Image (spheres, coloured by chain):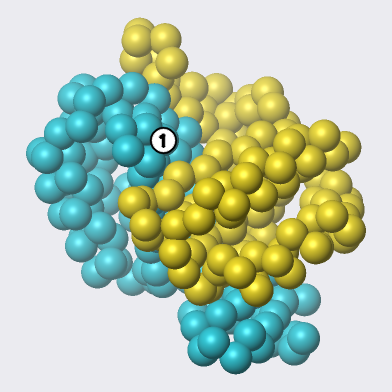
Chain colours: A yellow, B cyan
Amino acid sequence: MSAQWAEDGASYAVIFTSRLRTADPAYEDMAEKMLALATAQPGFVSFESARDDGGLGISVSYWRDRDSLLAWRRDTEHLLAQKLGREQWYAHYRVRVARVERDYEWGYDASQLETDHARG
Amino acid sequence: MSAQWAEDGASYAVIFTSRLRTADPAYEDMAEKMLALATAQPGFVSFESARDDGGLGISVSYWRDRDSLLAWRRDTEHLLAQKLGREQWYAHYRVRVARVERDYEWGYDASQLETDHARG
């Protein structure tokens, strides 16, 4: 294992876990719009999302530093989307903001080479 | 918003993102067994998981402190399951270990009361 930090350099993760009241295409539209908006923010690194059929959804956005994720938290259009989400779609959500300390991955190249990226 | 830390007191999150080669009930069995084993570990706090149909899966386990998650990383049965996963099921996975700095949630009680738990 090497001791290199992952190349994308994300230092913060925002873990957004949610349950929807009902499936709604309008929610998907909003979520796609917000993702496009987040992607364009300074300091945005990457995004991953999965939702069980009609159940729990987990979305994780990764950010270069704390300032960039704080700026996204304060974005007006994002705040309006959150308000709409609470009014129309979410039954529950929980947000964890976490500082990434280790980042390693396996796969992609079928050689089963394991790489390990650790900071500090 | 209050300034209380979330009651479950998780301070570390392990974000496990994976793609499977193919859907396999044997994988689900192994994942359930590992979850039961993790749940029994000292310092285990909670677990959340979602997988898109045949696509990306995100599982997040939360731990009381760094020592408890390191102990789980070293657990022999867990290590064997990871090896089996690389041999049989995973096309790719990525693991981020992150220290939780903020934790807040909305919902559960239909009163739309927002609670905010922040450490420090």
Q: Nearer the viewer, residue B20 or A57?
A: A57
Q: Nearer the viewer, residue A33 or B25?
A: A33
Name which residue lies at 76% across and 42% down. A38
Q: Nearer the viewer, residue B81 or B56?
A: B56
Residue B14: x and y in percent read: 48, 52
Question: Is residue A13 something one can see in this rendering?
Answer: no
Q: Residues within 10 Å of mark 1 (few under 14, many from 20)?
A: some
Count the labels in the image: 1
Q: Quadrant of the C terminus of chain A?
A: top right
Residue B21: x and y in percent read: 27, 23
Q: Tell me the quarter of the picture where residue B118 sits.
A: bottom right
Name which residue lies at 67% across and 60% down. A97
Residue A43: x and y in percent read: 83, 38
The amino acid sitting under disc 1 is: Leu
Name which residue lies at 45% across and 57% down. A23
Name which residue lies at 47% across and 28% down. A105
Which residue carries the number 1 mark? B56
Relative to A112, is A103 above or below?
below
Relative to A67, is B95 above or below?
above
Q: Tell me the quarter of the picture where residue A14 sits.
A: bottom right
Please, which chain is the residue tagged with disc 1 on?
B
